[in-house]
Amino acid sequence: MKEQTFSAVTLEEWKQAAQLSLKGKPLSSLYTKTAENIELKPLYTKTDVKGVQSSLPGEKPFTRGFYRLGTFPKPKIELAIDPVSEGAAAGIFPSKEVFEHIHNQSNITINTVPYHMAGANAVQELAVALSEAVFYMKMAANKNETVSKMIVHFAAGPRFFTEIAKIRAFRTLWSAVMDVYELDEQSKPAISVETSEQTLSALDPHVNILRTGSAAFSAVLSNIDYLHVLPFNQVTGSATELSERIARNIPLILKHEAHLDKVIDPAGGSYYIESLTNEIGRMAWDEFARIEEAGGIEYALKAGMIQKEIAAVQVKREKEIAIRKQLLIGTNMYANMTEKNEFTQQKTKRSNMKGEKIVALTPKRLAEPIEQLRQKAAAIEQTGKSVKVGIICLGKLKTNKPRTDYIMGILAVGGIQSVLSENIETVKEAVQFVEMNDFPYYCICGANSTYEQFGLELIEELRKVSRSAIIDVAGNWQVTGVDGSISAGDDIVEKLLALLSLFEGGSEQ
């Protein structure tokens, strides 16, 4: 077999090739920002990890693992109540009496899931984890003994590489905590992870298997001690024997079929992941230091500082779902109109914990605003009304189909059925379609050139026969007489909520 060699390529040559493939778009269009406000580059090189300390598993700074020999994570461990985070979720900061016997427990849990469910990003999760750990250590007679009982519990979300970097960064940060608080070399907490409920959806719930599988995959790659995979239909409140078996089998597949038990920290050495780990860790340490300087986790929660900052991230996440910058397949993209949905009301957590009232963390799944749209549509249909709108398909099929499909997909997200016209070639045909139906809403779909061909005459004639119906256009056609438009980047939750109000006798405006 002939040996094949490849000449080295410089970063500048890569940039030139990338620029050509972008067909006029700037190279900056390949850069994206994470929820932590970290800018991700399209390509990472060894210069991006310059100065990053490398080590073997079991060696400081423990980025690659707390121990030299890696093991596949054990199943879910029984976690003790974390009074601080559980209290934050219930709107209470516990009194001193609540903490009196915590150091006599078999384990001391630092549970970051309530923060995660309220919207916290990776940096915030790590900062509060460290702040809680320091809070428990400060009240202990023996810091090292306290740490030996600690289990730090995280949730793994949908951002695959961020979740790997988050756990790796936590161990690096813990190495710094050991130095600052003069802990023994063996004073390391166990790390437990559960797959995030935040990204699960009651819509098309079998897609949740892929979400939990990906989250579990990232958690295992990050080298953890315990892993718990949630059943795919847990959010409907109807976990079954099948869904629980699938949840148990996901780690088994990762172990026995993907052979993830055969290597420690396979992500180590990746320029991208090493750089991301370093960046998340640096930002988390700064956030942790800020919390401590302000008075620690107790002050930060009582002042509402943490809750306010986490809520701001949650608002940003919801916006990304609404404009479909972040996709939830089967929920805000490729919605299945034929499925029978099961919804459960989110139960508000109540606590008998004694303490001072604080601003409560507000847990919210990303799919909830979309689920509420579908619930609204279902409730309207139960009154005997049909939730249908008209799509006016202008021009030939090959020219109107892209926008017709796009609009049908948007409407399906809100449980709204689309009734399509024939391929409209004349204004008269469009008028006849509207006259034959009595929909409260119509959307005109076609190519830009077709819009110009039909011109203002189309809108004027449709207005004469459409009664009080709302008329929108797909795309950005600027013409007098239309009520609005639907195009990429729009807030579809806001739009669909307005459309559903038409069927309730309200107005879109």
Image (spheres, grey):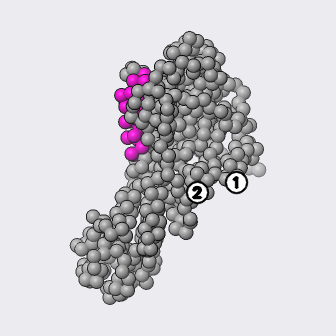
Task: Name the secondary structure under disc 2.
Answer: loop
Q: Is residue 440 visible?
A: yes
The answer to whether residue 61 is left or right of residue 424 is: right
Relative height, residue 474 to residue 285 (above, below): below
Estimate the x, y position of residue 464 in percent, counting from the top left. 25, 83
- Indicate yes or no whether the magenta region holds residue 191: no
C-alpha span from label 2 to label 1: 13 Å
x 39%, y 50%: residue = 319
The answer to whether residue 257 is left or right of residue 359 is: right
Point out the stretch of residues depicted in magenta.
Answer: 296-316
Residue 313 occupies quadrant: top left
The quarter of the image holding the C terminus is: bottom left
x 67%, y 53%: residue = 240
User: How many numbered callouts?
Assistant: 2
Residue at the spot of label 1: 242
Q: Residues within 10 Å of mark 1 (few under 14, many from 20)?
A: few
Residue 267 occupies quadrant: top right
Estimate the x, y position of residue 375 in percent, counting from the top left. 46, 61
Q: Amino acid at mark 1?
A: Leu
Q: Which mark is residue 205?
A: 2
Q: Amino acid at mark 2?
A: Pro
The answer to whether residue 225 is left or right of residue 306 is: right
The foreground one among 297 and 380 is: 380
Q: Nearer the viewer, mark 2 or mark 1?
A: 1
Q: Is residue 486 visible?
A: no
